[in-house]
Amino acid sequence: MCSGRRLRLIYNDIHLIAIDLDGTLLDDDKTIPPSTIEVIKEIQAKGIYVTLASSRPFCSVVPYARQLGISLPLITHGGAYIADYTGANIRLRQTLDRGASLAVIKVLEDHDYYLKVYCDDMLYVQEATRETIAYSQQFGVEYRAVGRNNLTSLTESPIRLAVFDQPERIDDVRGLIQPWLTYFSISSDTDSGLEFVDCSVHKGQAVALVCAELGIPMAQVMAIGNEGNDIGMLKAVGFGIAMGNACPEVKQMASYITKSNHDFGVEHVLQKYILSITK
């Protein structure tokens, strides 16, 4: 982890900040603290770009971008879908290999796993469980329940898959889908779930696409995150920031560890190492 003195010198050169949402920018009520909104707006007013990089569907990220006044392309579905907040200009839409994803869905359904299949902003599930309904309401994502063993009948190619179960059962998933592992980039936010995107996709690659459009070197980017799907992003940029509540793998490779998401961790690092040197 870099020292404060070192950070004070290097963060003079930050031109873009990419921030994860859940467990990072958002508090435990899934809101952005008002004081953090003001800090991010102040940073943007100084000419530093800010964008959001989340595993959420696009429709679930847009409301936060509007709160923050972000006009840059938004990174969603873990880097598989990138578009500006209007949705009119899609920079990337990388779906999963259809054959591999349908094969994996079938195997996991046959073994009674709970699956979420994302086709852009629509979520398909086997049945409308309490968790599904709560997720839909809290995250603003529409869902359709298609019935057990019917997810393979979808005509669209998924953009992301997620599987949930008890941790000991999640440990078995990679073995069950061994023949198709090379088609996917797999990450986890908890011991009870795994997420699948295309093997070419990760948040770091998505940030690079946004930076190329703006003409900003990746060395001049700060990224802030807390979970496994943020590792690619934190590794790819010049300065990776781990939240205080981040998983051990994220903390080990971060340039700096800030406070937790419920203790204004994003605001803390931005105040300390961005605003303090631009005033």
Image: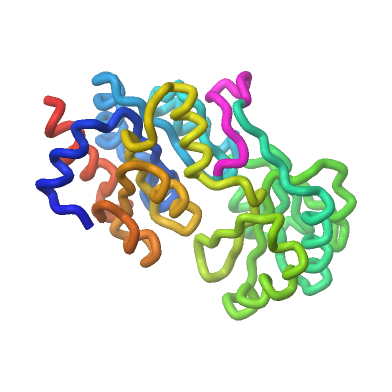
Magenta residues span: 79-90
Horizontal side, residue 93 vs residue 208: left or right: right
| Residue 199 location (% of width, % of height) | 64, 51
| Residue 271 location (% of width, % of height) | 19, 38
As rendered, which of 86 and 135 lies closer to the eye? 86
Horizontal side, residue 225 vs residue 128: left or right: left
Residue 86 colored in magenta in the image: yes
Horizontal side, residue 278 vs residue 211: left or right: left
Q: Identify the residue shown where x is 60% and y is 53%.
A: 134
| Quadrant of the frame with the N terminus | bottom left
Q: Identify the residue shown where x is 34% and y is 36%.
A: 221
Q: Is residue 121 visible?
A: no
As rendered, which of 22 and 269 lies closer to the eye? 269
| Residue 163 location (% of width, % of height) | 66, 62
Q: Is residue 4 visible?
A: yes
Horizontal side, residue 183 vs residue 148: left or right: left
Q: Identify the residue shown where x is 28% and y is 20%.
A: 47
| Residue 51 location (% of width, % of height) | 42, 32
Q: In which image quadrant can residue 36 be found? A: top left
